[in-house]
Amino acid sequence: MLKTEALTQAVIEGDADTVAKLAAEALAAGLPPAEILDRGLMPGMDVVGKRFGAKQMFISEVLLTARAMHAGLAVLKPALAAQEATGGPRPVVVLGTVRGDLHDIGKNLVAMMLEAGGFQVVDLGTNVPLDRFTEAVRTHRPAVLGLSALLTTTMREMKRTLDGLRQAGVMDHVKTVVGGAPVTEDFARTIGADGWAPDAPTAVATMKRLLQTV
């Protein structure tokens, strides 16, 4: 089995020690850090995200895979940073779970996968009110704003948040993506979001696609 394939499997199994060991070996063998990331770590998280979305994995298992992913990123980070230093500024994404909702596992996975993919992430956490979103968008001027909700009762807060941000005049050139288990494409369209995602891998893919069309 190739190192990247073994790395993917170790991520899926949540084996942090093996992920760190294989990532270090791949670097020592001369594989570019971006290739280790794209062909080793990310495919593992893609599988995990899809299995979690299909209710084939428990939250405890997802947390183990996230820990394993972090272990691999810690090994790759210095090499990736050296690459980024010659590549220009990274796109900024502001993330947050809307007011009234304390769920963060999906959002945390999105943040981790975005950082692995070369984005700069500003994670506002959970139960985020409109004024904090407004301040963050004004301060960081993100390329994308991601709103998360896991409760049907807090989906309405997504609309209130987007409406408030538009009224504040801070959303010029900012793409918006909404996500979470109860969120649908029709709902996203209704509230004027640019994209939607039911899981972390789809969220990252959607943000990348939106930025390519700018």
Image: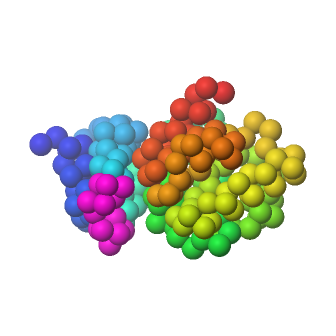
Between 179 and 75, the one nearer to me in the picture:
179
Q: Position of residue 86 (x, y in %)?
A: 57, 34
Which residue is drawn at the image coordinates 54% and 67% (left, top)? Answer: 151
Q: Is residue 213 above or below residue 23?
A: above
Residue 68 counted in the magenta span:
no
Q: Position of residue 174 (x, y in %)?
A: 72, 41
State whether residue 194 appears in this view: yes
Residue under the image location 57 percent in, 43 percent down: 186
Q: Position of residue 211 (x, y in %)?
A: 61, 33
Q: Is residue 100 above or below residue 133?
A: below
Q: Residue furthest left?
A: 1
- Judge whether 107 appears above or below 214 on screen: below
Which of the 4 quarters of the picture holds residue 136? bottom right
User: Taking the image as drawn, is residue 78 in sight?
Assistant: no
- x and y percent of residue 105 in the render? 46, 66
Specify the principal SS of the magenta part: helix
The region drawn magenta spans 51-64
Query: Residue furthest toward the top?
Result: 213
Judge from the rendering whether residue 191 lies leftward or rightward of residue 37; answer left or right. Answer: right
Q: For this rendering, which residue is in front, 212 or 140?
A: 212
Q: Nearer the viewer, residue 89 or 103?
A: 103
- Taking the magenta stretch, the answer to whether it contains residue 56 is yes
Residue in the image at 24% along x and 64% along y: 15
Which quadrant of the figure has residue 96?
Answer: bottom right
Point out the image quarter for the N terminus: top left
Task: Please state the total of marks drawn on the protein image.
Answer: 0
- The correct choice, above or below, for 195 with respect to 134 in the image is above
Q: In which quadrant is the C terminus drawn?
A: top right
Colour mode?
Answer: rainbow
